[in-house]
């Protein structure tokens, strides 16, 4: 029986001109994430997106960071599909967004963000939409 999911979507993005080399090393790996069927999406439909999956290394690192951020009391399920775009690839050639940060990323992510989100306000530091 296929799992049923009520999961949402996560948009992960980077481009702060400091950490993108970390993610670039993970995106250059050749082993891509393998899509998994669920009740709301058949494997045949999901396999159409096999060539745009993030690498397994990116997914593993992202899941590790999410679990560290939310703490051990929050169950973060594994993804069943991913999507990865490197904006430096053709036909785009680049992706750029900059802003004057008033606080560093390292100072922003702290213990106050690692609370049960059902009982506290959501802190959104990385605002660049």
Image (cartoon, helix red, strand yellow):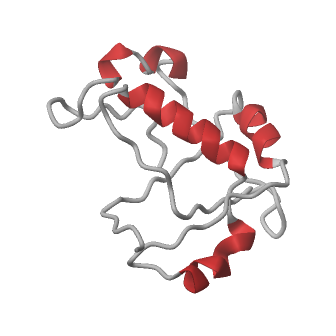
| Position of residue 51 in the picture relative to residue 59 (left or right) | right
Q: Name the quadrant containing residue 84.
A: bottom right
- Image spot of residue 80 (x, y percent): 52, 62
Which residue is painted at 54% across and 48% down in the image? 12
Q: Residue furthest bottom?
A: 44
Q: Is residue 72 visible?
A: yes
1 vs 126: above or below: below
Numbered marks: total: 0
- Image spot of residue 81 (x, y percent): 55, 64
- Image spot of residue 1 (x, y percent): 40, 74
| Position of residue 19 in the picture relative to residue 114 (left or right) | right
Depth check: give the residue in front, 107 or 24.
24
Which residue is painted at 44% across and 21% down in the image? 109
Q: Name the quadrant containing residue 16.
A: top right
Q: Residue furthest front?
A: 1
- Image spot of residue 118 (x, y percent): 17, 37
Which residue is painted at 42% across and 73% down in the image? 2
| Position of residue 113 in the picture relative to residue 78 (left or right) | left
| Position of residue 53 in the picture relative to residue 10 (left or right) | right
Depth check: give the residue in front, 100 or 58.
58
8 vs 119: above or below: below
69 vs 97: above or below: above
Depth check: give the residue in front, 115 or 38.
38
Q: Residue furthest left?
A: 119
Q: Name the quadrant containing residue 7.
A: bottom left
Q: Is residue 97 visible?
A: no
């Amino acid at each position: 029986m296929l799992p049923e999911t009520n999961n949402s979507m996560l948009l992960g993005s980077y481009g702060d001109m400091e950490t993108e080399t970390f993610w670039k090393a993970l995106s250059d790996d050749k082993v891509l994430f393998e899509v998994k069927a669920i009740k709301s999406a058949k494997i045949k439909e999901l396999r159409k997106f096999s060539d745009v999956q993030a690498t397994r290394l990116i997914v593993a690192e992202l899941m590790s960071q999410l679990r560290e951020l939310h703490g051990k009391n929050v169950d973060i399920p594994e993804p069943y599909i991913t999507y990865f775009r490197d904006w430096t690839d053709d036909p785009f050639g680049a992706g750029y967004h900059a802003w004057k940060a008033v606080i560093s990323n390292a100072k922003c992510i702290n213990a106050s963000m690692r609370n049960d989100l059902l009982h506290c306000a959501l802190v959104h530091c990385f605002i660049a939409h």
